[in-house]
Amino acid sequence: MPKKKIVVLTGAGISAESGISTFRDAGGLWEGHDIMEVASPQGWKKNPQVVLEFYNLRRRQLHEVKPNAGHLALAELEKDFDVSIVTQNVDNLHEAAGSSHVLHLHGELFKVRSTGDPRLIYDWKKDLKLGDVCEKGYQLRPHIVWFGEEVPMMNQAISLAIKADIFMVIGTSLVVYPAAGLIDYVEDVVPKFLIDPHVPILHGIKNLFTYPFSATQGVPMVIQKIKEMYG
């Protein structure tokens, strides 16, 4: 008998518990910069040095943090279920915990890409500087989906959501689109578990179970519930 398919949407809340600061921690500001200055094509065009330094700091921080109990519990779930994680986070903590099917909607801090040919993507764990170029000679940029840019992995995420037997949402307030709309593609009969200290008010979502807890608290609770339902 094939394993039940669990699709998990994760947001900033699960990473915050590992010590990764979110944009909203500082009221949308970063060292006095409006977020559009460091996370938009316009900001990149205006001052690429500021943008590069912003992501260099975040990349350095990523070397210092570790997966938490929420990440580890999701990785462990692969023993009994077919698990796919769709994450809005740009860190690698799901992979570091051992999850093997992770789709990054908003890009990855440990990757960079060519400004002249977006198909050229490279693994990158050090600082990125002006003058670092791809094999075609174009400046490299963070492999991050900025505000105003398309989300190229969204169609793959939708395909996963449509096939889900169980759907989990962890550490996201479901206000950032298009990711927030993913739950709308999950079939009505599918049980949906939402784990976040600030559970959003959702209308018209059937079979929704809410857990107003942090990821490290709520994920093990939900996994226990899933195993009782399908074990």
Image (cartoon, rainbow, N blue to C red):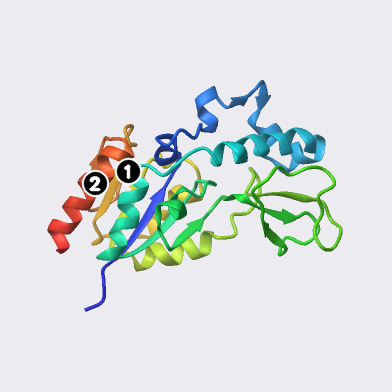
Residue occupying the point 35% across, 56% down? 75
Name the residue beneath numbered marker 1.
69
Percent of width and height locating residue 197: 31, 32
Please give left or right for residue 24 compared with residue 58 in the image: left
Residue 137 seen in the current view = yes
Is there CB contact under 8 Å for labels 1 and 2?
yes
Label annotation for residue 199: none
Residue at point 26%, 35% (across, down): 212
Instruction: For marks 1 and 2, give the one nearer the viewer.
Output: 1
Rendered view: 2 above or below 73: below
In the image, is residue 136 above or below residue 29?
below
Residue 201 showing in the rendered view: no
Residue designated by label 2: 220
Residue 93 point in image, percent of width and height? 46, 48
Q: Quadrant of the N terminus?
A: bottom left
Q: Quadrant of residue 28?
A: top right
The tally of labels here is 2
Q: Residues within 10 Å of mark 1 (few under 14, many from 20)?
A: some
Q: Secondary structure at mark 2?
A: helix
| Residue positioned most to the bottom | 1
Report the quarter where the C terminus lies.
bottom left
